[in-house]
Amino acid sequence: MYFLQDFLPIVIYFLLIILLIIGIILGIKAIEALTKVNQVVDDVNKKVESLNGFFNVLDFTTDKIVSLSDHLIDFLTTTFSKIFLRKNKKNKKEEDE
């Protein structure tokens, strides 16, 4: 009985030391992996920033095209509505007379 009381705490302490060492090693590996991931993210961020000018030009161009098409459609709809309203007004005047 005394043997177990003396031997078990030594085994538990030994296992805790091993667990602590494994935890430290895993922590160091995780820090190294995060550093590599951070470098990759920085590289991707630099490449995306280099494309910002292209995207700005593309956005400006699409905005101008949409504006032009809106004005064209507005002009066409007002023209057609004026033509059809004149015909309707003429028809109503003829019916009234």
Image: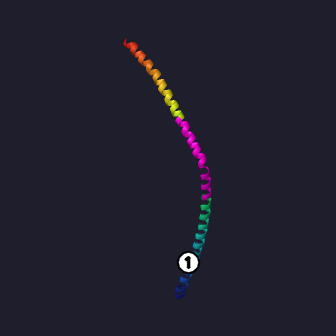
Quadrant in the picture for residue 86: top left
Q: Quadrant of the C terminus?
A: top left
Direction left: furthest residue: 96
Looking at the picture, tell me which residue is in the foreground, 94 or 61: 61
Q: Give me the residue at 46% from left, 24% from top.
A: 81
Regarding mark 1 in the picture, which secondary structure is present there?
helix
Note whether 42 is above or below 3 in the view shown: above
Percent x, y of residue 23: 57, 72
Decide whether the magenta segment is chiefly helix, strand or loop.
helix
Q: Is residue 53 magenta?
A: yes
Q: How crowded is mark 1: few (under 14 residues within 10 Å), some or many (20 or more)?
A: few
Q: In this view, does 9 lie to the left or right of 86?
A: right
Q: Name the residue under label 1.
A: 16
Percent x, y of residue 24: 58, 73
Quadrant in the picture for residue 40: bottom right
Q: What residue type is labelled 1?
A: Leu
Quadrant in the picture for residue 25: bottom right
Q: Give me the residue at 53% from left, 83% from top.
A: 9
Region in magenta: 42-67
Percent x, y of residue 53: 60, 48
